[in-house]
Image (cartoon, grey):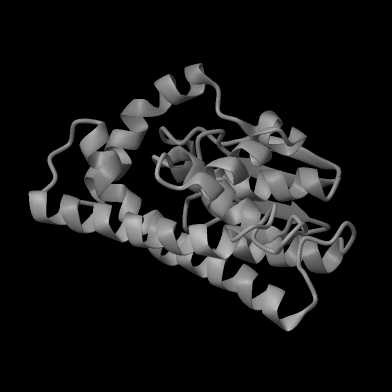
Amino acid sequence: MLKFYYHPISVNARRVWVGLLEKQISFELVRVDLGGEQFSDEFSAINPLQRVPVVVDDGLRVIESLAILDYIEAKYPEPALMPTTPDAIATVRMVESVTVGDLQLATFPLTRSAVGLEVEAQKLEAAQQRVTTILSFFEQLIADGTYFCGNKFTRADIVAGTLVPSLPLMDYPRLTAWAQRLSSRDSWQQTAAQPEDIEAALPTIRTILERRA
């Protein structure tokens, strides 16, 4: 059975978790304590980069969330989470790339400020402007569809959906409605971080953010 190494507050891990559930793949959850277990010899042997998520399937180890989503899509093609038309494929890839390579990085200064860590005013303003630009772009991509690719739920919704709803969306009615639709899915409800997990992880979050200063 596929083993999935995760932590419940990890956005990167959650997108894989949602993907596994949406594809109805049988898997074993293996929780990794990010307070130090990720640095253990045992886990480092599984992922030398010492972070989640990781999946181990039939002896194959795959790290990094997007690579894992690629793997499960190729090995477990039904139900499909990747579209087949060129325009829809481009949309999914754009949303994934912007979310992971741009939006997620822009949220770090905002999160640092939210947990009481010092952030230069200029960096904080730049981060807020970047987030606004990206959310506006995503608002346009949603258009009048149910999801990013019209009425078809795809990886774009998983990757963006495990990050965007945590941001203020009052000025983005389409994204707000989209986030509400996502929250009604079983996969979202099963993977939602519990308050006690978030509270327990706050010291670790602060430590990670301090390292990224």
Seen in the picture, residue 27 relative to 139 is either above or below; the reply is above
In percent of the image, x 77 and y 79: which residue is there?
Answer: 85
Specify the farthest residue to the bottom: 86
Q: Position of residue 65 (x, y in %)?
A: 59, 57
Q: Would residue 52 be seen by someone viewing this image from the given angle?
A: no
Specify the farthest residue to the front: 144
Q: Would residue 131 be seen by someone viewing this image from the given angle?
A: yes
Q: Position of residue 94 (x, y in %)?
A: 55, 72
In percent of the image, x 14 and y 45: which residue is there?
Answer: 119
Q: Position of residue 7 (x, y in %)?
A: 55, 36
Q: Position of residue 64 (x, y in %)?
A: 57, 60
Seen in the picture, residue 40 relative to 137 is either above or below; the reply is above
Q: Could you tell whether 138 is left or right of 102 in the image?
A: right
In percent of the image, x 49 and y 17: which residue is there?
Answer: 196
Specify the farthest residue to the right: 78
Seen in the picture, residue 163 relative to 76 is either above or below; the reply is above
In percent of the image, x 26 and y 57: which residue is there?
Answer: 129
Residue in front for this viewpoint, 191 or 59: 191
Query: Residue 89: which quarter of the image?
Result: bottom right
Residue in front for this viewpoint, 71 or 154: 154
